[in-house]
Amino acid sequence: AGNGNTCAVVNCANSLDANGHVYIPAEVTQIKDFAFRGCSTLKTVRFASDSMLEKISFMAFDSSSLTSITVPSSVKTIDRNAFVSTLSLTSFIVSCASTMYIHGQAFMYSGVTSLSLPSAVIYTDKRNTIPSCSFCAIGKYSVTGDDGGGPCTDCNAGYTTNGSGTTGSDQSV
């Protein structure tokens, strides 16, 4: 796009392998609106170790068959409805080093039933989109209790928000 670099567009039509896995190359900075919407063959998303991804956009994985995703620490924003109606999503893992903003409706009607986040992550919701929340499972942050990077030291047990995007104390769901 004028800088000599090739633009990479990732979506359901051009990015899946035969087993339903997607590899997102390092140069991709955004997963665009509706990129994998309705992608019934999508199972997992894997990112380059030096990922420059900054944003997962509006309805990027809406109604897909995504089961797991490990979000790179480079991500700064996960938009509203990014994973809406992704019923099979059961593993959403964020790095302990993440400092992102997650819109409160990012997981609406998804399969995510618990969410554990580092204290530096802002999640703007009162937990009405996650029916049951457990945090700092096994001293780590993730739905599965392990981000692969070892134990987190800054556990914000009972992480929740007061609706304004700032973290609150341990509040009930």
Image (spheres, helix red, strand yellow):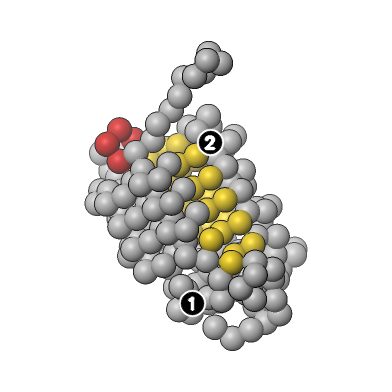
Number of marks: 2
> x%, y% of residue 150?
66, 57
Q: Is residue 149 left or right of residue 92?
A: right
In percent of the image, x 27 and y 48: which residue is there? 39
Q: Which residue is mark 2?
A: 29
> What is the x, y in percent for residue 105?
47, 65
Residue 61, how many percent across, how many down? Answer: 37, 52
Q: Which residue is mark 1?
A: 128
* Residue drawn at (31%, 54%) of the image: 64
Mark 2 / mark 1, whichever is N-terminal: 2
Q: Is residue 26 above or below residue 125?
A: above
- 114 relative to 3, above or below: below
- Give the vertical position of 135 relative to 77 (above or below): below
Q: Residue furthest bottom?
A: 172
Q: In the image, residue 138 lies at what x, y percent?
A: 61, 71
The picture quadrant where one finds residue 96 is bottom right
Label 1: element kind: loop
- Looking at the image, which residue is at 40% across and 49% down? 60
Dot 2, how many residues are within 10 Å of its Cα: few (below 14), some (14-19), or many (20+)?
A: some
Res 146 quadrant in image: bottom right
Which quarter of the image is occupied by the C terminus? bottom right
Amino acid carrying label 1: it is: Asn
Q: Residue furthest right?
A: 153
Sort mark 1 into few (<14), some (14-19) or many (20+) by Cα contacts within 10 Å.
Answer: few
- Residue that appears at 56% across and 16% down: 3
The answer to whether residue 73 shows anywhere in this view is yes
Which of the two residues, 130 or 113, is positioned nearer the viewer here? 130
Element type at marker 2?
loop
Callout 2 touching callout 1 (CB < 8 Å): no
Q: What amino acid type should be assigned to the residue bearing mark 2?
A: Thr
